[in-house]
Amino acid sequence: MQRHTGRDMWEAEVCQSPRMGSVILGVDGGASNTVCVCIPAAMPFNDPLPVLSRTVAGCSNQNSVGEDRARETLERVMSQALLKARRRRSNVCAVCLAVAGVNHPIDQQRMLDWLREIFPSHVKLFVENDAVAALASGTMGKLHGCVLIAGTGTIAYGFTSDGREARAAGAGPVLGDWGSGYGISAQAMTAVVRAYDGRGPETVLTNNILDFLGLASPDELIGWTYEDQSWARIADLLPVVVESAESGDEVANKILHNSVGELASSVKAVVQRLELGGEDGKHPFPLVMVGKVLEANKRWDIGKEVIDCVTKHYPGAYPIHPKVEPAVGAALLAWNAIASELDGDIRSVQ
Amino acid sequence: MQRHTGRDMWEAEVCQSPRMGSVILGVDGGASNTVCVCIPAAMPFNDPLPVLSRTVAGCSNQNSVGEDRARETLERVMSQALLKARRRRSNVCAVCLAVAGVNHPIDQQRMLDWLREIFPSHVKLFVENDAVAALASGTMGKLHGCVLIAGTGTIAYGFTSDGREARAAGAGPVLGDWGSGYGISAQAMTAVVRAYDGRGPETVLTNNILDFLGLASPDELIGWTYEDQSWARIADLLPVVVESAESGDEVANKILHNSVGELASSVKAVVQRLELGGEDGKHPFPLVMVGKVLEANKRWDIGKEVIDCVTKHYPGAYPIHPKVEPAVGAALLAWNAIASELDGDIRSVQ
């Protein structure tokens, strides 16, 4: 195995004992940061799960930070997790990278090729969109069912038991992910501008958003959005929109209802294409719900509304709010894939 | 007058004769480039107007390129226009800068202060949003009526004869300028993604947009938008959307109808706030129409639809499609202001 990097991040591993047990690395690379966990490969299914180490780094979405920086971040977060767990690369039996920005088989293959330069050929490698790890975090690593993520962005992603997959949304703000935290906040700011220039009804969003941002007038909003167009910064307005809706504001309520419609429509599109509900639409399947938009608020519970909307069409959908983070989901995905393979081997021997 | 810049752009003016006649500079700084024209101050109203020189530079929207680069571009385009017209700064009697990104009195004052460092105190200075120059380009410099610009972005801007002003939209893509070229194109790309992942109806936009961009599949659209998020690049899809609508595609037609509604709503908001139509809404006022979205196409004429929509409420609105460019409008605005002042002086003497 040859690796030539400016700084060899793996140098420290010579200090570690090679006799320690096998491990699996799970990486979740989201819009704002990257988390890596290291779990034992021979893992008893305990609650809580035995996580040996956890490390965090910045964004590793190659669409946002470029390929080089994304790879450097991923390599660093993995080498640090191994160091912290006192393991070497030779202890690793599987790696699952679940990263935002992997939208195409070409992205996936390039990432796999790169990963193969780091880990020798016997190590099982998996590269998935970060949504897949979120699904696995709710299903103990089994890829079956549908996950809905709604944080800064939004995506719905689903798998059938026989490995077919489908996704909806997750295309970013230009391409209309209106149910996301960004989408809700951008619509709320738009409503403020429209009320100000006479194109839309008055709304308490005006005072609430200006107060929150420390601005004096709606025309300062234009400068504020130009200053820094990061989606997460705009998505941070979400609690203000929810509070405004909870106080009875019609404009804010309409925005949240639209968001529910958009999010449910993403889930239904995936479920329909994969026929997760079976022929009669009533078969049970997991619906994993992840992200701050779907967390319960005081009165306005976007997640619950989405579930109600989906179960009207697919009564078999059973919602799961994962107890573990997506990085653990990624590790469980790899664990589950190895276990299934072993299971297959045992069965073929029998 | 003291000026200290790294490169003194004004050095060349020592070659020019100071005896040449007085001139006015008009600058239009839009989303993609900056145009400066130099016209004689003692201008007979000929058709075509006697433009002494015209120079072009890159973007001078300080929100896009930063304050330093915006100022450098503006200074360069003005010094080159004077050089080309064989005039000096001492020949200049008025300057009108009409630049995108001037959204607030603070922006305006800072720009005026900066301009005053270049031109001595007797030179009349005007700083306006670029929409104001577009209005002036249709009214021979008189600030009365409403202008609708719909190119990459969109804004409606209006003035009463007694100097009150109002605007609507022009807040950029985050804040929902949906009637703009960017807005129309982003909605069309969103429709392609929605059709692809099962959230929306099939549309010929899919084939037409993929063909135009040389992409093989809708999931490549995500990567394409991330590559370069400049609004003008996305707005370039406008002709594809119009052609798709003209071929009878319902999705494309709906997007264009929405755009008409949005654009008309901006005009109506400005007209209503300024009462340009008088108490009965029937008073005549100019409605200046500028930008590629409003130019006539084969069958689908967005500009005409917007005018029909506005004149239903305000039958006195008379549409003007300017014959001169906004930079000339900016120069005419300054010319008109000086002429009004002289007129006032003459009247006060009488």
Image: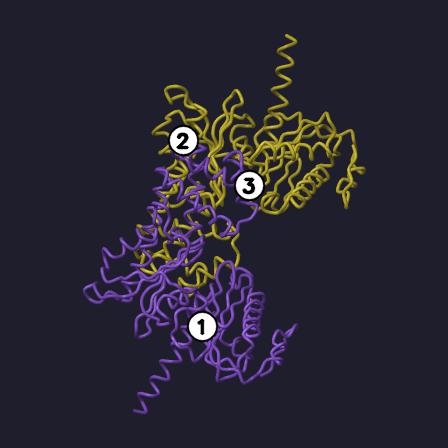
Chain colours: A yellow, B purple
Name the spot of residue B219 as percent of width and height, x first.
52, 35
How many marks on residues? 3
In the figure, is residue B249 to the left or right of A164? left
Question: Residue furthest toward the top?
Answer: A350
Question: Residue furthest toward the front?
Answer: B47
**Circle 3 sits on which residue?**
B223
Label 3: chain letter: B
The image quadrant of residue A178 is: top left
The image quadrant of residue A349 is: top right
Mark 2 or mark 3: which is in front?
3
**Circle 2 sits on which residue?**
A268
> What's the mark number on residue B289?
none
SS class, disc 3: helix
- At x 64% / y 36%, what residue is drawn? A37
Residue closest to the eye, A175 or A189: A175
Question: Residue furthest toward the left?
Answer: B280
Q: Amino acid at mark 2?
A: Lys
Binning the other alpha carbons within 10 Å of mark 2 as few (below 14), some (14 to 19) or many (20 upward) gives many
SS class, disc 1: loop
Binning the other alpha carbons within 10 Å of mark 3 as few (below 14), some (14 to 19) or many (20 upward) gives some
Binning the other alpha carbons within 10 Å of mark 1 as few (below 14), some (14 to 19) or many (20 upward) gives few
Name the spot of residue B93 as percent of width and height, x first.
48, 81
Name the spot of residue A155 as percent of width and height, x first.
48, 37
Q: Quadrant of the C terminus of chain A?
A: top right
Q: Amino acid at mark 3?
A: Gly
> What's the mark number on residue B50?
1
Mark 2 or mark 1: which is in front?
1
